[in-house]
Amino acid sequence: MGLWLECEFESSMSNELLKYVRAVVNIVKLSNEGIKLLEEFRTAEAMESFAKGIHEDTLADEIRRNLLVRLQDLHPGFMRERISTLLRRLDLIAEQSKEVARNMTLFPYLELPGEIKNAVNELSAKAYESVSRLYDITSLLINREYDKVLDEAYKVEVAEEDADKILVRGRQLLVKYGSVIRNPAIILMVDKLIEALEGITDFAEDASDYLRTLALYCRSLK
């Protein structure tokens, strides 16, 4: 019975954890929406969306810090260690997405060749898809629906593999259009951007793998 209690989430802690995951998802969502707005030539709205994403990261940081403080009141052991580790992995997603938002405000995205913009859009969509699933996976873990956690974690893994392929294609396109994009700084910035977007899916997969590990452990105690 003692081991089983290791997998019980205290109610208010669960709510705060989900609040933090939702904030991280929202950072990625705002970047994704900003890129879509740029495609529609709604530049001012796009810049506002990126700025909101950066601000949302500040709010998420505050939630994370409060969670870490509250964790000090929990007994040492499984729950305290596991939540702390999960928060660190989610924080990497938030930081990477903030980097994307900053990059998007620095270079003339609309001047890029269509194929490159398509690759950016696809990577952004995969990043949002991956991170969105983390909220569902965390909720499922809290509610002890361990088999569903495994199913959803697999979908994040597939999305990350897709993002890998898009990243490779995006870099091939940078080579293809290298002579068209005359400013080499823009090529470097686009490469950094697509790498950051793919990095979000990498970090999302890391977080989902960790949640899957927790689900397997807790399921074994039933």
Image: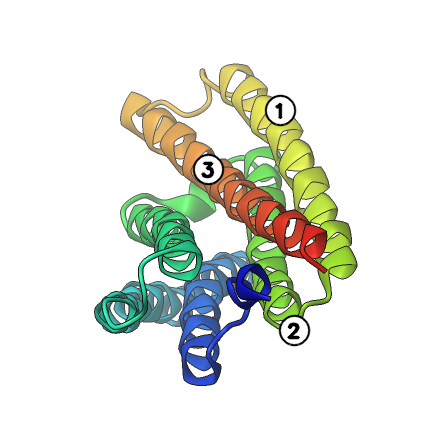
Colour scheme used in the picture? rainbow
Q: Amino acid at mark 3?
A: Gly
Total numbered badges shown on the rendered structure? 3
Identify the mark at residue 169; answer none if there is no mark.
Answer: 1
Relative to residue 6, is residue 82 depicted above or below?
A: above
Marks 3 and 2: which is nearer the front?
2
Image quadrant where residue 135 sits: bottom right
Q: Earlier in the sequence, mark 1 or mark 2?
A: 2
Relative to residue 17, is residue 110 depicted above or below?
A: above
Residue 119 point in image, percent of width and height: 60, 38
Residue 188 point in image, percent of width and height: 34, 25
Residue 104 point in image, percent of width and height: 36, 50
Identify the mark at residue 143; answer none if there is no mark.
Answer: 2
Q: Amino acid at mark 1?
A: Arg
Identify the mark at residue 133; answer none if there is no mark.
Answer: none
How packed mark 2 is, by other alpha carbons closer than 10 Å (few <14, some 14-19, many 20 or more), is few
How packed mark 3 is, by other alpha carbons closer than 10 Å (few <14, some 14-19, many 20 or more), is many
Q: Amino acid at mark 2?
A: Asn
Label 2 residue SS: loop
Q: What's the distance in space between the residues labelled 1 and 3, CA to CA?
A: 15 Å
